[in-house]
Structures are given as C-alpha cells and as structure tokens.
Image (cartoon, rainbow, N blue to C red):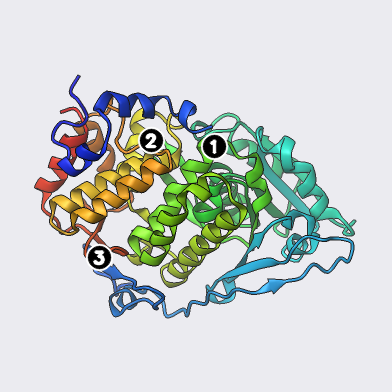
C-alpha cells in the first residue's frame, strides 16, 4: 500500500506526523473526537476585513435582491421565562426572507416558534438520538398556550447512511404525513443535525408540492451551515446530495443549549465549516478562530455563540446574493468536492461530513499552492488550525486516484463536462470558483494524497 504522504506538498509533510499515524488517527476518529451575470467557468471573489463585497463579488450576483444582516434583540413575552434574548440574523430574500434566531434557552420561548406556524397541524421530523433529548421540549414549545395546534412526529434512524429514499427514511416521512391527513397549511419541523434538516426540508418541498417548514438544528454543523439557505436533499449511491431542491424555511431556531449534549466528534466536525468561512471570505474571522480554537474545543459558551453568529452572517449574506448557487454561493463549498468524494468512496456515514470536508480542504489548499495562487503561510495556518480542531488532514489510504476522479465527475459543480473547483487565491479570505486551472495540479494533488 502506497503511503498517503508520498508526493505531498513538503510543507504539509513537515508539519504532520508520519503517514500511518495520521491515517490510523483518521480511521479511529471515535477515539479522538468524543444569472446570467456569472461566468460558467470562473468567478473570483474577495472580501476584505469588515467591508462589503467587492466589485468582483457584486458582479457575481444572480438577483438584485438587497442583503441585510441585522442583529436585533427579541425579548421573551412571557414574564415567567428568564431565558436571555435571541440574536437575529436575517436572510434577505424579499418576500421569502426569514430570521435565524440564535441564543441560549430559545426552546423555552414558545412565541419564537409559534409565530411561524400558520396552520393547525405540525409534523416534527427527528431521529432516534435527538428525540429522547428534545422532542418533548419542542412539542411543548409549539403547543404551550396554543391548544389549536396538534403535533405529530416521525422518528428516523440516525446517520448519513440513512439519508436516502428507501426503507425507514424519507418515505417514512411521507407515509406519516399522508396517514395523518396533513394539508397544505401544515408545517414540517426539522429537529436534529444536517441529515434530518436536509431530509425534512426535501420532504417539505415535495409533499403536496410544497409546505412550510422550520429548522431547529442541534449540531454545530447544522447551526453554522446546513440549516441556513434552503439546500435540501438526499444522497444517491453514485454521489452525495444529487437529489434535492432549493426550499427555504420559515425560520431557523438555534438554541445553543442543544450543543451541551453534542459528542466531541460532532463538535469538531462542525468546526470544519466554521473554518471554511474564514478561509474563503472573512480573514478577520479566521484570525479570531486561530486565537480561540481552544475555547471552541472546550465548548466555551461565548466563543461558540460568536462563531455561530458570525458563520450565519456570512452564510446569510451569500445566500441573499446567490440563492440558487449560480456562482458566489458555490464558494461555500471549499473542500467539498474532494470531501464528498471521500464520503461516497468510503460509504456514507463512515466519516462525518465535517471530517471529510477538513481533509478535502487540505487537498484544495495543496492544489492552490501547487498552482502558485497562495503562499506557504496560508498552507501552514490551515494545517495548524485543523490539527488543533482534531480533524483529519488527509483522506484514508483506501481511496484511489481513479475513485476520486469518478466521483468528482458527477459533482454538482460540473458544467458542460468541466469540473469547477473552489480554490484559494491571493491573500487570506480570497478564493475563486473556477474551471480554469492547470489539470496537472489536480493530478499532482490526487497522487500526493491517494494511491494510484
């Protein structure tokens, strides 16, 4: 078996332990982690410190919708409840705009959820892990002082491997909705991590050709990324998230207290997406992460709350400008093309999404360096922060170059047979979404990290 460090950028090799140690660590993660205006081939983006999007990003708009990121305070209307106020980040999509509520104890503020339920019927979609922890609490939040609302629930198996159409998964949601005779005024509620959010959202988009839904994410991954922006879908054996729809929620409610029950491995996985925002568009945020990564790993409440808020602000801004991922929004997928190939090649659920994205980010950074688009200081900083977050920095050595190429060939970012990638270019916080790159650099990166 070829060593996965063979041919790897020497900057990575010098910073990392030996190949077998890294891959043994990655294989035993449980022990470490408890429109038309956009060129189809290339969009270059830069966002400077505390600045609006530059002209390049403005040209990447696919609509004239103005974006707004507002921090506001929503005070609890019930004098009996002592929960602190929520911070609100607004996703500005015109008449389909919606709030992201962020704060501690928000499930104790029933009015936040109830104001977004317009009919009398609610279906909560959750899983076997989250249901015992939070299902009753969400039912109470939906029904307290609101006797006209009736709530049903469907509990799915937990895990990425169940994110599909068959058996006890998506069809179970449709079965429950039809058996309960839900109508078009019903509301679906996604209670769980990214898998539940994606499946519930897709079910809501498809049931009766579209019913309202609400996101209540309970993992870092879902809170900082997947619950925001309306991407919904399921996996196919040939590729991740190939079947789905863009379908926006009525609101996203992030009760940061739900992270108290999150396993360490899931926490680390979510931080991969937090790190992504800093690399592609928010250099100041990345610098903050470098100073506060230990606090994040230690679950410091103020550090986590800030990371979630800042991530949601970045995501909301991008979604407001490019809802359907014609250009700008694609940059949020740094490391994902390589990462999705890892998830598909290994089998869904073997690695968590963020673990695969972390290794994929290292591969994208390696390729960016080989192209001469970034300097070695960025390479070192990326490697350092991922290591501190207990995330893998290379794919498992069971994956081959041909496997990567075959899976990447059906990636959603392929256009007219051309694989477009998100790569870093220029100073920290700058990236490109492009198909205009030297294929030799891609081949060199794949051979550096994989068996031939």
Q: Residues within 10 Å of mark 3 (few under 14, many from 20)?
A: some
Above or below, 432 relative to 216: below
Q: SS for tag 2? A: helix
Query: Which residue is labeled 2 in the image?
Result: 343
The residue identified by callout 1 is 264
Tag of residue 427:
3
The reply, left or right, for residue 187 in relation to residue 164 is: right
| Distance (Cα) linking label 2 and label 1 | 20 Å
What is the residue that sits farthest to the top in this orientation? 1
Mark 2 and mark 1 lie on one chain; the one further toward the N terminus is: 1
Mark 2 vs mark 1: in front? 1
Whether residue 423 is situated above or below residue 133 in the rendered picture: below
Which one is nearer the viewer's eye here, 323 or 82?
82
Q: Could you tell me how far apart the alpha carbons at marks 3 and 2 are, in whole angstroms?
A: 30 Å
Q: Nearer the viewer, mark 3 or mark 2?
A: 3
Q: Is residue 141 left or right of residue 409?
A: right
Q: Is residue 299 left or right of residue 378?
A: right
Q: Which is nearer the eye, 25 or 223?
A: 25
Res. 247 visible in picture: no
Residue 340 picture quarter: top left
Residue at 77 percent across and 44 percent down: it is: 152
Which quarter of the figure is the N terminus placed in? top left
Estimate how packed mark 2 is, as few (under 14), some (14 to 19) or many (20 or more) residues with alpha carbons within 10 Å: many
């Amino acid at each position: 078996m070829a060593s996965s460090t063979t041919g790897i950028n020497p900057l990575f090799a010098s910073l990392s332990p030996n190949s077998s140690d890294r891959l043994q660590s990655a294989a035993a993660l449980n022990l470490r982690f408890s429109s038309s205006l956009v060129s189809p081939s290339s969009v270059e983006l830069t966002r400077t410190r505390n600045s609006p999007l530059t002209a390049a990003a403005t040209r990447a708009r696919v609509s004239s919708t103005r974006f707004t990121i507002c921090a506001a305070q929503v005070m609890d209307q019930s004098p009996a409840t002592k929960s602190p106020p929520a911070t609100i980040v607004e996703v500005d999509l015109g008449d389909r705009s919606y709030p992201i509520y962020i704060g501690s104890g928000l499930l104790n503020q029933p009015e936040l959820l109830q104001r977004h339920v317009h009919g009398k019927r609610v279906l909560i979609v959750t899983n076997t892990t989250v249901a015992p922890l939070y299902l009753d609490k969400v039912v109470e939040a939906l029904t307290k002082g609101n006797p006209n609302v009736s709530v049903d629930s469907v509990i799915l198996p937990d895990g990425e491997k169940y994110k599909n159409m068959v058996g006890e998964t998506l069809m179970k949601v449709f079965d429950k909705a039809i058996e309960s005779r839900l109508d078009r005024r019903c509301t679906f509620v996604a209670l769980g991590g990214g898998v539940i959010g994606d499946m519930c959202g897709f079910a809501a988009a498809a049931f009766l050709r579209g019913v309202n839904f609400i996101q209540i994410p309970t993992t870092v991954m879902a809170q900082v990324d997947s619950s925001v922006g309306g991407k919904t879908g399921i996996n196919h054996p040939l590729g991740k998230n190939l079947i789905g729809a863009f379908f926006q929620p009525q609101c996203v409610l992030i009760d940061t207290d739900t992270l108290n029950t999150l396993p360490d491995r899931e926490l680390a996985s979510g931080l991969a997406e937090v790190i992504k925002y800093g690399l592609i568009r928010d250099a100041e945020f990345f610098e903050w992460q470098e100073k506060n990564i230990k606090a994040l790993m230690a679950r410091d409440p103020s550090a986590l709350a800030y990371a979630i808020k800042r991530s949601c602000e970045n995501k909301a801004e991008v979604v407001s400008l490019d809802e359907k991922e014609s250009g700008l929004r694609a940059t949020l997928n740094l490391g994902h093309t390589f990462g999705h190939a890892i998830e598909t090649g290994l089998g869904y659920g073997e690695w968590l999404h963020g673990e695969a994205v972390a290794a994929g980010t290292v591969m994208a950074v390696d390729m960016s360096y080989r192209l001469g688009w970034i300097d070695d200081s960025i390479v070192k900083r990326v490697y350092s922060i991922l290591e501190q977050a207990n995330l893998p920095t290379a794919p498992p050595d069971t994956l081959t170059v041909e496997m990567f190429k075959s899976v990447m060939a059906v990636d959603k970012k392929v256009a007219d047979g051309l694989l477009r990638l998100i790569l870093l270019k220029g100073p920290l916080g700058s990236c490109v979404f492009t198909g205009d790159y030297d294929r030799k650099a891609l081949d060199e990166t794949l051979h550096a990290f994989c068996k031939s």
